[in-house]
Image (cartoon, rainbow, N blue to C red):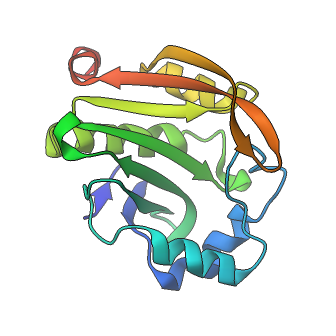
Amino acid sequence: MILETKRLILRPITIDDKYEVFEYRSDIETNKYQGWIPTTISDVETFIGKVSKQINEPNTWFQFIIIEKEPQKIIGDLGIHFFDNENRQAEIGCTLNKHFQNKGYATESVKSVIDYLFKGLGKHRIIASIDPENKNSIRLVERIGFRKEAHFVESLFINGKWVDDLIYAMIEKDWENLN
């Protein structure tokens, strides 16, 4: 499964991506809202080994690598959590190398995946779980058309502390109305 936009290619993650993924994922400051920050290449190998090799497998995470077409550089990744297929819902999360943020790449890649999830896989609802302090991610999902549905107080234990969790969501008919 490969998705393509004007400037990007999204393809499944492979073990060969481990060094480039480690380069941006190990940046503690940039990824402070992430639940996973690798400290070794082995951590990335373990992560890649755990993600599903098939898209739309129930109760798994599938990981796309985001590649800038020119110069064919990995600039981030986008994960999709597939719940059981009966409820037709998925969760998404995007991580970009700090040198490629604020250029519209996250918007471009997230929109491409949303379009595929609704039109290609027939999903009904897509959610995003965001730390309330992560203002960039909040602006991203709101700009795309997600609505805030919940604010859970100290509901996740991430990086050694309890944090709040905002849930944003979009349903298929909302996406159709926006596009």
Residue occupying image coordinates x 54% and y 16%: 150
Instruction: Look at the image and tell me whether residue 19 can be seen.
Output: yes
Q: Look at the picture and state if 73 lies above or below 170.
A: below
Total labels drawn: 0
95 in relation to 177, above or below: below
Residue shown at 56%/71% (left/top)?
Answer: 47
- Give me the residue at 70% from left, 63% from top: 24
Q: Left or right: where does residue 3 sit relative to residue 164?
A: left
Front in this rendered view, residue 10 or 8: 10
Would you identify the image quadrant in which residue 10 lies?
bottom left
* Picture quadrant where residue 119 is located: top left
Picture coordinates of residue 128 (x, y %)?
Answer: 49, 33
75 with respect to 154 (left or right): left
* Residue 68 percent coordinates (x, y): 50, 61
Work out which quarter of the rendered image holds the N terminus and state it: bottom left
Camera-nearest residue between 152 and 47:
152
Q: Residue 149: x, y in percent?
A: 48, 14
Place of residue 54 in the rendered image (x, y in percent of width and height, measured from the top left): 27, 67
Residue at the spot x=37%, y=37% of the render?
Answer: 111
Q: Is residue 6 visible?
A: no
Q: Is residue 177 above or below residue 71?
A: above
Which quadrant is the C terminus positioned in?
Answer: top left
